[in-house]
Amino acid sequence: MATAEPAADPAPAAGASRHRGGGLGRYLLVRFLLIFPTVLILVTVVFVLMRSTGDPITAALGGRLGPEQLKERIHAAGYDKPILVQYWHYVSGIAHGDFGTTITDHRPVTQVLTTFGSATLELAVYALVVAFLIGIPLGRIAAARRDKGPDAVLRVSAILAYATPVFFAGMVLKLVFAVWLNVLPVAGRATTRSILTMKTQGAGTGIYLIDAISTGDPAVVGDVLQHAVLPAVALGLLTAGVFLRLVRTNVIGTLQTGYVEAARSRGVSERRLLRTHAWRPALVPIITVIGLQVAMLLGGAVLTETTFEWKGLGFQLVQYLLARDFVAVQGMVALLAVIVAVTNFVVDVIAALVDPRIRY
Amino acid sequence: MASATTRRRVWAITAGLAATTLLLAACSSGKSGANATTGSTGGSSTALTIGTTDKITTIDPAGEYDNGSFAVINQVFPFLMNTPYGSPDVKPDIAQSASFTSPTEYTVKLKPNLKFANGDPLTATSVKFSFDRVLKINDQNGPSSLLFNLDSTEVKDPTTVVFHLKSPNDQTFPQVLSSPAGPIVDEKVFSPTALTPDADIVKANAFAGPYVITSYTLNELISYKANPDYQGIYGAPKTANVNVQYYADSSNLKLDVQQGNIDVAFRSLSATDVDSLRSDSKVQVVDGPGGEIRYIVFNFDTQPYGAKTPQADPAKALAVRQAVADVVDRKAIADQVYKGTYTPLYSYVAQGLTGATESLKGLYGDGKGGPDKDKATKALSDAGVTTPVTLNLQYTPAHYGPSSADEYALVKDQLESSGLFKVNLQSTEWQQYSKDRTSDVYPEYQLGWFPDYSDADNYLTPFFLQGGFLKNHYDNPTVDQLIQQQATTTDASARTALIQKIQDTVAQDLSTVPLLQGAQVAVVGKNVQGAKDTLDASFKFRYGALSKS
């Protein structure tokens, strides 16, 4: 059954102004300023939630030290201070660009981000590539075969793709390709040998594909790519489903517009109509969706990275959560919130510039 | 708008890149993980790859008190005293000699011409520096509490150091020197007042243990190379190059060792995984004694008939504890829940350690380690206890592994099947559990212990000495006196007899009911040797014992 998904705002009537609520500058300024309360609210929520789960010292040493010794160490670390005092101390630190040092492994949070961010970025790019390669062409096919067998199959597949939990998809892929067929690696970003080769001969970017290419060893490049296949597909399928349905809906919508009907009446073939007239306009909304997908990918990355031992930000965030490392979790969430907020701001800017239907 | 030619070029480049990528992926063997070779400095030139789910906190000895960090530290830092293969008792490692020179003075003489891998001399000054900084830094995650009896450290000459102790004749002190508080570090590299970052330690090559670290990525991959300057108890490692790969998920660890991507999997595969690997022809499962113990604690104030209950009656309270000890079937728990990765425990000191007995075996149950319902019934009826006795038994769901729920479900079943008990089983998350157990909230509850060092005292003093960490209101002056006596008895056999006597005495009182002792389990490739040698009662996994043919 075809779903009637709402399209973007209808095009303004002829002669109507785009600038109903003020100019582009004001629109962008408001969007930019919204980043700060968004991040602050998120950081505050995480701060309160983390404090409600207990302290890291008890988590680590509760079974080894007596209550007095535990109390002494908790006091020394300042975890017995009033929560407002701790909160003020933390927010003041952030205001000065100090996200703190992790409790469990004594690393500056900013260093954690730079160390693991490259892995997450690499995975996100792979996943987007998978999403584009699968979602967009299949969306186009579904639109071209509207309400026929292929369309029905693709729509159901799309729903399955974004309704299936990432970790479940990951486990199924791992079971099939790594365990039963044994054609792809179980986990990790590369084999020990490749990692050591990259460490000694690579560019040292932390993005393994670049590092692997810089070694000049095809086996290392192949190894890195092999390790990327399953996590990229597991995470990419999530977004591919969204892209498929979005492209399909937009192409169908565009095929029903007046200018396409006019072209059709002039005898232009359906294939040409799809390729030349309906295809590009249908891709515009994807720009907006990419912004939303960044947050989705980061969320999915937590599960994908954990499933595949892909040691990026998501993987590390889980480790810190399990250890109740306040500082690490708060810092990472704050930085991830900044990334998502800034990405959405950039998408808003691009969308405002390229989509004539957006009103300020 | 791009021209048609430009579009064609873009497509051609894209297609070319995609084809190259696929070709490279296809060409890759993808199976080189366990076969990396690097330059050799002795031993086998083929690198050995070990996988583990342990995590590292820091490789600065002043900041670690966990298995994962200590596993690294054991390979790269020297100790004054250490446990030789196959023995739980300590011997001089980089020390030439070590002994009490007065009741409160423990004097250690170093071997001559010791040095760190970076060329810095390792002298008595390094030793003093190492112990002083652990106490000074007093890190929240560190081992400083193990040095509670160390008053000061004195340098007599470049190779002689004297430890001044607060309590005389502390027989556990040599063991403390082999514990997480005991590694010797380079004073030219380490900060005296703060933890030194791992990267700085690695960069400075400030190691003097059997291995040095050549490549270090925290909780991801560490590469070790044999240290030719090591003069300690273990000698030259059998394998010159070792890589350790860190996993978060034990199922990935299992699959990798099964598929030969790693040579050794050590800590921590699930009981089910170990059980399935036992029948896998591609690997061998090697078992050894483990130091970890699991037990049920009774709160003497709040247990049924406890001192602070309305029906307080010490004789009835003891009968309840005895009946639990009679009814519980340890072997069934070890086999059914842990598939042999834990073994039944019938005393308070882990089997394999000097002085360990099986005091509970003859006292309770059928006298051979099995349960005996009739004996439990008699114990309760002799004391005048009305049955069924209600027990509010607590456990924590994850801290002691994912099988705790199964373990305690089986304990509940065993107790209730006897008809003598009605068990209300409750679980509480670890953070709250840690607070509740010492606040008299739980009448009887689960607990586990992993030793700081391989000495029986470590299973007695923290538990049964007044003011210990259990806080279960157990108080037996005789036991207190015996514990203090054994800790200062210099004659080894006399001390062993005291340790045995303590276990026999506590077994009568049943402050706790020991259930299980964890085995050490390593899963290795068929071509790997030496795992059995290091899986001993030292509870230290020493990579130098391993080799690959």
Image (cartoon, rainbow, N blue to C red):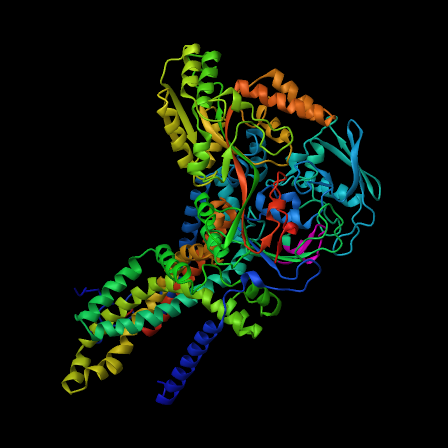
Q: Nearer the viewer, residue B544 or B316?
A: B544
**Horizontal and vertical percent for residue B367?**
50, 22
For the point 69% across and 25% down, which residue is it? Answer: B495
Residue at the far left in the pictured view: A265
Any magenta on residue B211?
yes
For the point 23% across and 69% down, which residue is it? Answer: A249
**Horizontal and vertical percent for residue B26?**
45, 73
Reply above or below: A65 against B505.
Answer: below
Which quarter of the picture shows residue A251?
A: bottom left
On-image quarter of the N terminus of chain B: bottom left
**Horizontal and vertical percent for residue A269?**
19, 85
Q: Which residues are magenta?
A: B199-215
Q: Nearer the viewer, residue B307 or B260?
A: B260
Query: Is residue B402 rendered to the left or right of residue B40?
Result: left
On-image quarter of the C terminus of chain B: bottom right
Any magenta on residue A99?
no
**Horizontal and vertical percent for residue B352?**
61, 34
Query: Is residue B143 rendered to the left or right of residue A262?
Result: right
